[in-house]
Image: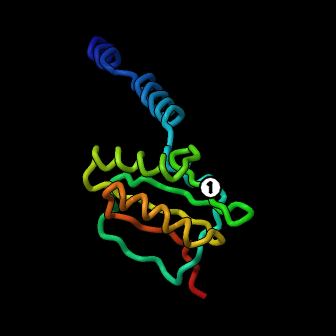
Amino acid sequence: MMFDREIEEEMRIDMTPLVDAIFAIILFLLVCSSFVESMEQDLSIDLPTQGKALKVKTPPSRPIVVNVRNLPGGRAYYHVENQQVTLPALTANLSRAQVRNVNQAVVIRGDRNVKWEHIAAVMGCCAQAGITKISATVEIREAQ
């Protein structure tokens, strides 16, 4: 009988190192991952407000975000993928994106104080590039 107990004790497998290795891998992946979408949200743009949120069935696949920021003197600052661009450069970038993806979408984040002509200029760039899926963002006001 003593012999049977020794065999049972020897056949146990310690799972602690395996669990430690899995936690180390998860921690490594969390630390090394980057979140690209958060970079576009870092700009301080004062968005206009709307009464309630719209429900969308399926979100578009990775739209190009164009930030239009108000500058003193009625000028505008166009910002795409962490770079300041001019309107001709924006048109060229959108044309290249349209060639790569026929259903390319563009999201315009315009400051509340920016003149409408600057938003319309971005829409004109989209039209020149052949992009028809254009949307603008607003800040959702909480129901009171």
Circle 1 SS class: strand
Residue 40 horizontal/vertical position (percent)? 55, 51
Looking at the image, residue 36 lies above or below residue 60: above
Residue 44 horizontal/vertical position (percent)? 66, 58
> Residue visible at 28% across and 46% down?
99
Tag 1: amino acid: Tyr
In depth, the one of 110 and 20 nearer the eye is 110
The image quadrant where one finds the N terminus is top left
Q: Name the residue beneath numbered marker 1.
A: 77
> Residue visible at 56% across and 72% down?
116
The image quadrant where one finds the C terminus is bottom right
Looking at the image, residue 123 lies above or below residue 55: above
In depth, the one of 94 and 48 nearer the eye is 94
Q: Residue furthest bottom?
A: 144
Colouring mode (rainbow / by chain / secondary structure / one colour): rainbow
- Left or right, residue 137 beside residue 74: left
- Left or right, residue 122 beside residue 71: left
- Left or right, residue 65 beside residue 134: right
Q: Quadrant of residue 75?
A: bottom right
> Residue visible at 35% across and 54% down?
129
Residue 87 horizontal/vertical position (percent)? 51, 53
